[in-house]
Amino acid sequence: RVRMFGRLSALTNLEGIATPLFVILVHGKHAVILLACVRLAAVLTVICFVPESRPPASLRSSLCANGRLAFLSRWQGVSKLCSDKSLRSFLPLAFVAAGTGAGINAIALFFCKAKFGLTRETFAPYVSVGTVSNAIVQLILIQPLFRMMGLRGLFAFSLVAGSVNCILYALVPSPGWLYLLAGLSGFPNVGVPAIQALMSNLSESVPGMTPGVALGALQAVQSLIMILIPPVFQGIFAIAAREHVLLSLPFLVAAVCNVICLVVLLCLPKSYFPDSE
């Protein structure tokens, strides 16, 4: 399952290679409209054409009804996730780790603009390099890493890599070094398929829960995190810039959050982490 989720993560992030390059060529509102259309198409595709996370009863209904039931079932599954002790212990850890990554991505351009004077056009190549790095890690390296470390070790590795990446980002001396950081940025993302595989494994022991429903609920909450957490990090960066303190403060906050998640992870029982694919 780790390999499967890794491939899925790599494929769903392919837009990150092309979209930054389009930003260089397409300016202003046209770039925003292009990205909005891509995002809307992705959301509609998942809601209407991916049946795995829907209850079996909804699979026989119409396309519109399918989409409506799929959307509601994802949020109904959240309460089931929170009702199980093993999942409830792990969920906050997974959400904080995902939230720090989303927050850092939200302020990366502002940080580079304030520190190095980069614009959307000059920053876009770094985004493409980072997405290529993620694809290589998810498609080629994640399976060997999983075999060496297991699910627990893979998630721990992602937290360590995320902390190191945040600290290096905070200390980067020149724009040229950003290519190196972008090239290494795929390693923290191995935590995404590790979380998905773990949730899929644990959900099999929860009454009334299936791996598909669990992953649909997980995706619903992660989507909410992607909306709520970035403004928090943007606020931290705005305060740091306004008060003339460390511009890298959001990266240091993210590194501390990852370290706290790592400590909590190491305290969880090993039974939560079955080393199965």
Image: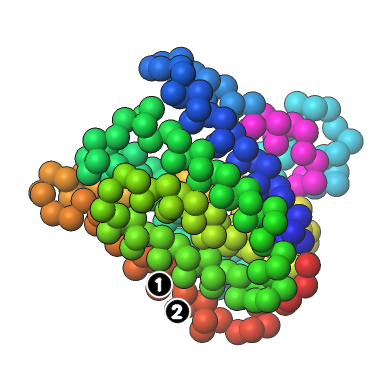
Q: Quadrant of residue 121?
A: top left
Q: Is the C-beta separation of discs 1 and 2 under 8 Å?
A: yes
Q: Secondary structure at mark 1?
A: helix
Q: Give the position of the N terminus as an image quadrant.
A: bottom right
Give the image location of residue 48, x and y in percent: 74, 31
Classed neighbour count for the residue bearing mark 2: other residues with Cα under 10 Å, few (<14), some (14–19), many (≥20): few
Give the image location of residue 46, x and y in percent: 70, 36
Give the image location of residue 176, x and y in percent: 35, 46
The answer to which of 5 and 51 lies nearer the viewer is 5
Horizontal side of residue 116 vs 122, given as left or right: left
Residue indicated by mark 2: 263
Horizontal side of residue 32 vs 208, given as left or right: left
Region in magenta: 42-54
Distance from disc 1 to disc 2, alpha carbons, whole Å, reads 6 Å
Give the image location of residue 101, x and y in percent: 45, 53
Residue indicated by mark 1: 259
- Residue 251 lies, with reference to residue 231, above or below; the image says below
User: What residue appears at the point 47 percent right and 40 percent down from the top-left corner?
Assistant: 127
